[in-house]
Image (spheres, helix red, strand yellow):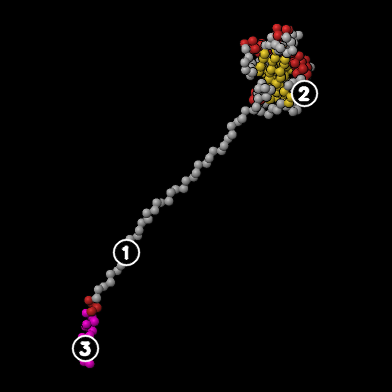
Amino acid sequence: MSRVAPLVLLSALCLLAQAAPRAEPSPEVPAVKSVLPAALPATTAPTPEPHTPKPVAPALQDDGLLDPAWFGEGVTFTKGDEVDYFWVKPGLNLAGHTLFMKPWEDPAMLRKGRDGKDNAKATEITDSFPGMLRGALTGAFNGRARVSRTEGDLTLVGRFVDANAGSKAAKWLIGLGAGSETATWDLKILDPKTGEVLVAVHHRAISMTAMSNIQDKLVKWADKFATFLGTQATR
């Protein structure tokens, strides 16, 4: 082979290499931005308020005439003979104390349907009964405790919750309980500094015959109560 042939072949290969298309670099694909929403800030669910039960008023006793709410918390009544319903703080000793006999509250008249005579009777005995009690308690305490209408380190207060003036004529003519006079009351002894109840009482007096009236019954009960309290709480 002559030298011319290889040179011709080499020249042809160079021309072919120059004529071949160059591979273009792949274009960069732009980053795809996320279309998802950004994470929302964490939220705290509101804490439900604790359920607070509504206070339930204590049930009335003695056919609706004994309202425990008037006496306050911690009083559990016992039924008795000389006193219909009573409670005395355990360990109470009134010796050396002075009971301030406050004027009683206006009548509450919890029994519906009472008329003007009944309300007048309730007002009358509201004014007179504290004096009856003061005298009876002074005698029963016999100096171990005192009762005053002007001062004291303990307080006795009360109220009438019902009164029925009755009928003297019915007592005389009919009898058998017709025309009876009745009076029902609450009383309590308090420590005025703390408001603590020391003694709680609820009682009803009845005058059934023409031989007595409700004032007579109140005087007799005051003596019984004074003896009861003197035995229970003075030593």
Q: Is residue 10 magenta?
A: yes
What residue does disc 3 label? 5
Does the CB distance between marks 1 and 2 fall below 8 Å?
A: no
Secondary structure, mark 2, is helix
Q: Could you tell me which secondary element the residue under label 1 belongs to?
A: loop
Residue, disc 2:
232
- C-alpha span from label 1 to label 2: 105 Å
Q: Mark 2 is on which residue type? A: Gln
Give percent across and percent down for residue 104.
66, 16
Q: Amino acid at mark 1?
A: Glu
- Write down the region rendered in magenta: 1-15
Main SS class of the magenta portion in the image: helix
Taking the spot 66% from the left edge, 18% from the top edge, the residue there is: 161
Q: Residue 192: percent from the left, percent from the top?
A: 66, 23
Between 143 and 20, the residue placed more toward the observer is: 20
Quarter residue 217 falls in: top right
Where the N terminus falls, by quadrant?
bottom left
Q: Give whichever of 99, 228 is nearer the camera.
A: 228
Left or right: 14 in relation to 172: left
Task: Decide which of tag 2 and tag 3 comes sooner along the chain.
Answer: 3
- Above-or-below relation of 159 to 172: below
Whether residue 231 appears in magenta in the rendering, the answer is: no
Q: Which mark is residue 167?
A: none
Q: Residues within 10 Å of mark 3 (few under 14, many from 20)?
A: few
Q: Are marks 2 and 3 in contact (CB under 8 Å)?
A: no
**Please, which residue is most extreme toward the front here?**
174
Residue wearing tag 1: 28
For the question of whether residue 234 can be seen, the reply is: no
Q: Is residue 27 left or right of residue 104?
A: left
Q: Residue at 68% across / 11% down in the picture? A: 166
Q: Pick the residue in front: 111 or 53.
A: 111
